[in-house]
Image (cartoon, grey):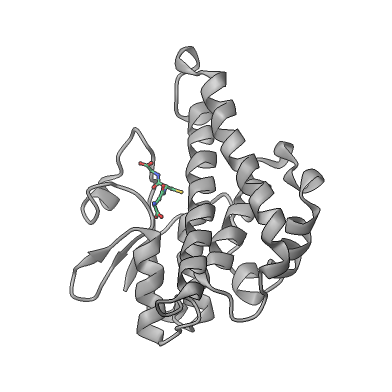
Amino acid sequence: MKILFAPTSPFVRKVMVCAHLTGQTDEIEKLDSAAHPVRRDPRIAAHNPLAKVPTLILDNGNSLYDSRVICEYLADRAGASYLFPAAGPERWTALTRQSLGDGMLDAALLARYERTARPLEFQWDTWRDALLNKVEAGLDAIDAMASELVLEKPSIGEITIACALGYLDFRFPEFDWRARHDQAARWNDAFQTLPALQATRPYES
Ligand SMILES: N[C@@H](CCC(=O)N[C@@H](CS)C(=O)NCC(=O)O)C(=O)O
């Protein structure tokens, strides 16, 4: 398999964490890419009309996207049912936590694009503030559920939340989310020490 990869992308990180936890990293070749909301990367667009990463290219040439689908594919391939529990309350909790983390990431990424991709004359602070309000409300929810978040045999819910918190540390250090969310910070600090999280820490290439 091949993945259109970016070391800064929290959505790619979700996939790579799942690959590490299930022992599949050696089966995934990383391909360079430069996803951007305005400048489409033809290397990605050839496999995904949305031109976003992550995109996984299977050995038969078919592609899978987005991170939700790829993570579930890898879990299924490895028989790692703890990542995506079978239908029932645990599954809905895990998927809702995944949606929470993904939604926070969508908002944070748009807030970043507002500054890095949009020309200065088109930037609107009210819009960016509203996006960061979503992130803050998500952090409140994570703080409130922190005692339920596990460190061993995590579901896609914990993995996505950890990728979201890691992205805030990486791209929004001035947001200082830890100052207002000590329960979430305590769980996250422990979770980020897991080998799969250490191996996938974001970096600028
Ligand atoms: N829902 C997608 C989101 C993926 C996403 O937004 N990726 C970013 C990079 S972190 C991207 O490709 N941005 C390019 C664009 O917005 O066109 C997923 O879960 O994979």
In this rendered view, identify the residue nearer to me: 96 or 7: 96
In this rendered view, identify the residue nearer to me: 3 or 178: 178
Q: Is residue 7 visible?
A: no
Identify which residue is drawn at 70% across, 56% down: 144
Identify which residue is drawn at 66% across, 48% down: 139
Q: Residue furthest bottom?
A: 79
| Left or right of 146 on screen, residue 82 | left
| Left or right of 137 on screen, residue 68 | left
Q: Position of residue 131 (x, y in %)?
A: 54, 33
Q: Position of residue 137 (x, y in %)?
A: 63, 42
Whether residue 178 is situated above or below residue 110 in the rendered picture:
below
Which image quarter holds the N terminus?
bottom left
In this rendered view, identify the residue nearer to me: 96 or 165: 96
Whether residue 113 is situated above or below residue 153 in the rendered picture:
above
| Left or right of 143 on screen, residue 69 | left
Whether residue 53 is situated above or below residue 118 in the rendered picture:
below
Q: How many marks?
A: 0
Identify which residue is drawn at 56% across, 29% down: 130
Q: Position of residue 69 (x, y in %)?
A: 34, 65
Q: Is residue 150 visible?
A: yes
Quadrant assignment, res 67? bottom left
Whether residue 41 is situated above or below residue 83 in the rendered picture:
above
Q: Residue furthest front?
A: 89
Q: Position of residue 61 (x, y in %)?
A: 19, 69
